[in-house]
Image (spheres, rainbow, N blue to C red):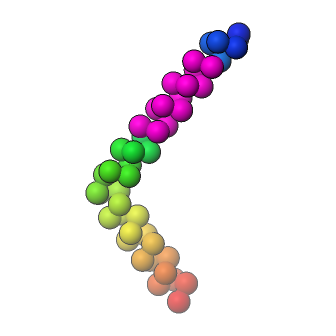
Amino acid sequence: MDKKKRYIAFHVASRLNKQIRTDIISSPNVNAKQQRIDKQNEEHAV
C-alpha cells in the first residue's frame, strides 16, 4: 500500500469516526441511556 492510498483510507476512516461520534452525541436516546448507566454506577458506588 503506497502512502497516498493509506492517507486516503485514514482520512475516510477518521471522517466516518467523527460522523458516528456526532450522531451518538446528538442522539437523545443514547444520552438518556448513558445517564441511566451513570446513575446506576453512582448508586453502586455508594
Quick check: is 8 in the magenta stretch?
Answer: yes
Quadrant where the N terminus sits is: top right
Q: Quadrant of residue 8?
A: top right
How many labels, in total? 0
The percent position of residue 5, horizontal first and vertical second, equals 62, 12
Determine whether, in the image, residue 8 is placed left or right of residue 20: right
Residues 2 and 44: in front is 2
Check the image and report above or below for 15 versus 9.
below
Residues 27 and 45: in front is 27
The percent position of residue 13, horizontal first and vertical second, equals 53, 29
Residue at image x 35%, y 60%? 31
Find the residue positioned furthest to the left: 28
Quick check: is 13 in the magenta stretch?
Answer: yes
Residues 18 and 30: in front is 18
Residue at image x 38%, y 71%? 36
Q: Quadrant of residue 33?
A: bottom left
Determine whether, in the image, residue 39 is placed left or right of residue 3: left
Residue at image x 43%, y 69%? 37
Determine whether, in the image, residue 9 is placed left or right of residue 16: right
Check the image and report above or below for 46 versus 26.
below
Q: Main secondary structure of the magenta part?
A: helix
Find the residue positioned furthest to the right: 2
Check the image and report above or below for 42 versus 22.
below
Residue at image x 39%, y 45%? 22
The percent position of residue 16, horizontal first and vertical second, equals 46, 32
Q: Quadrant of residue 6?
A: top right
| Chain part drawn in magenta | 7-19
